[in-house]
Image: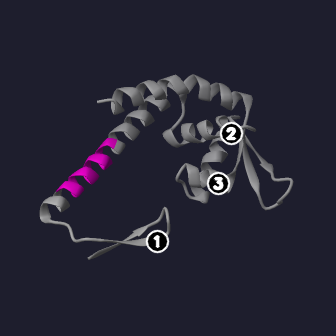
Amino acid sequence: MTVWYNPRVMTIIRSKPTTARDDDQLVAQWRELLDRHARTTCALEKVLQERHQLGVSEFEVLERLACCDAEQHRMQGLADTVHLSQSALSRLIGRLEADGLVTRSMCAVDRRGIFACLTPAGRERYEAAKPTQRQLLAELLND
């Protein structure tokens, strides 16, 4: 019996042993997933940078902020949703802030909380980059 940790439900899952064929198929699926992710991310990084001066993570942060009702998101929660450490997100927000695309603000209720807020320039850059990102995703993922 194999024991797996499932982080979504924070429990351990026990499964029956796999056969060599099942194992090979599972590894092949995993490698295909990694390959597809790498190809897509690299292509997006190149095109978004060339056309909109945005990296993939920067675009993702702008999109998460643009999709929020108040166009702001608490930094800790934002780090989780874009799969970055708090330190990496803080550096990324610093770059976006320097470009005038986001601002930081203190949480009025909890002074320890900091919000990343989308600026009008950030909304404009996001809206300009969105069709490029969607077109490339359609080309790469609809095969």
* Sequence-first disc among 2 and 3: 2
Amino acid found under the numbered disc labelled 1: Thr
On screen, residue 71 versus residue 24, left or right, reads: right
Start-end of magenta stretch: 25-36
**Disc 2 designates what residue?**
68
Query: From the viewer's perspective, is the residue at label 1 or at label 3 nearer?
Result: 1
Number of other residues with Cα within 10 Å of mark 1, as a class: few under 14, some 14 to 19, many 20 or more: few
Q: Is residue 41 magenta?
A: no
Badge 2: residue crowd in 10 Å (few <14, some 14–19, many ≥20): few
Question: Do the numbered discs 2 and 3 sit on residues whose CB atoms are within 8 Å?
Answer: no
Which residue matches tag 3? 77
Marks 2 and 3 sit apart, C-alpha to C-alpha, by: 12 Å
Give the amino acid type for the residue marked by disc 3 in the picture: Gly
Assign the magenta stretch its main secondary structure: helix
Residue type for callout 2: Cys
> Which residue is the site of mark 1?
11
Q: Is residue 65 above or below residue 82?
A: above
